[in-house]
Image (cartoon, helix red, strand yellow):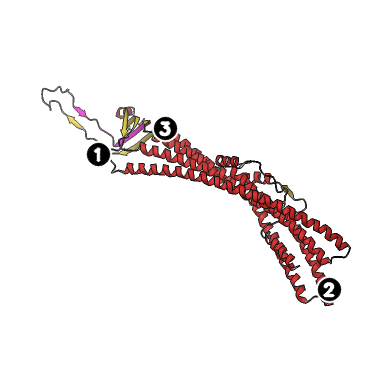
Amino acid sequence: MKRALAVLLASLSLFAGLLLAPPAAGAEELSFARAVELAEKHSEILMLRSSAVKTAGLALAEARSRLGPELTFEGGGSYMAHPPLTITVQPGALSETLLIPDAPLVFPEDKPSGYFELSLQLSQPLYTWGKLQSSVQLAGLGLESSRTDLAEGKRQLRQDLHTAYFSGVLAGHSLDMLQQILDILEQIEEDRKRAFELGSVNRLSVMEIQSQIAEVQRRIVQVEEAYATALEAISVYTDVDPQNLDLNTGFRQDDPGFSETELKEKALESSEALKKARLDRERSRANLELVRGGANLRPDISLNLSCELSGQTIPWSKTDWQDSWDLNIIAGVGTRGAIFDSGRSQHKLRQAEEALTASQLAVDLLSKQIRFQTRQAVENMRLHGAKIEESGAALAQAEEEQKNASRAFEQELLTREQWGMVRIKVLQKRLALLEKKYLFELALYELESLAGVP
């Protein structure tokens, strides 16, 4: 009997932290698929990553806009403390060889102290050695990378929600069996107390069963408290009232039916981490082209068109205000570039080349790791599938023993304590099978998540 109870307590320890109480009357049924739908709709983490996608999209639009023309303006008004001096030339004051009018000649005319200037400049890049195109490519890869982060966030959210949800399902099915075990132990306690009163057993025997009852009661409380935490976790993901939940999706026991080779290929194809590593490689390649475009003796060429307007009289302040204003239009092609930079551009180029090599190595390494993770996930799933078969056979044997013990108890060939221990053994096997189904569900979903199987 001691041994059976010790095995029972060891089995109960498997359920510490694995949570659920019976659903309240009128509770809302929540399937796992519905929980995922709600979580993806209400998750603040996904909202933040969606915002990052929008930001990256705007950054791409900004990079593309740099390929087009840019129109800028400058304007200003000034006050001159010493405007140009007025010079008067009297008749006959110069050489007789010059033609001098009869009236005095004044130049320049009196100038006001104000000065106003307005200019418009239009600039259009013509050739930049691929720098602008590389910038656009980098921004586009940044957008794809943020989308990959969003997809990875959804996958991780579903993974975490799956663990919480089916931990709740496990406890929901196991708590009733734990209570049945407690009821049987309490019956055994009553029998031992009567036997102690009759002097057929000592007090230590009673205290032993009481200690085991206290242990089971403590574990039931632990399960109930852990259930409240699990429901709260589901509520955080889904925004559903944790006091009004009925988890109605059960465990699966079917193999996905894919070969290991197919699963590995699917894992490589659907891995968001691998997609991001490949995007990082492309970003390194685009950055290399950007650095090459900024090397020595690679000047940028652009078309520049400017319109300059300046004057000294406030517009419309006088009838001849426009006489002091000048308009000039300048069109030209400009260039700018470095001739010598003490080797700085070469060092940057080598850094970019090394980063590209490292990014390729990262892709190769991650591909190997994904294949290995798939192998481990397949092993884990198949092992737990085999354990289900093993636990199912053990349960069938225990149930057959219970049938025989039931007849023996009816014929008074077994005591109530012996009959209770047989029933406890059956409940223990059912708990063990339930746990194996739970672990198989986790292993199966991990493999599906890794392989991108919906």
Mark number for residue 67?
A: 3
Local SS, label 1: loop
Q: Main secondary structure of the magenta part?
A: strand
Foreground residue among 392 and 169:
392
- Alpha-carbon neighbours of circle 2 within 10 Å: few (<14), some, or many (≥20)? few
Quarter holding residue 97: top left
Q: Which residues are magenta?
A: 103-124
Residue type pointed to by label 3: Leu
Q: Is residue 260 above or below residue 189?
A: above
Foreground residue among 153 and 241:
153
Front: mark 2 or 3: 2
Residue type pointed to by label 2: Arg
Dividing the image into 4 quarters, which one contains the N terminus?
A: bottom right
Residue 75: x, y in percent? 36, 36
Local SS, label 2: helix
Q: Is residue 97 above or below residue 220?
A: above
Q: State the residue lying farthest toward the bottom.
A: 199
Q: State the residue lying farthest toward the left.
A: 96
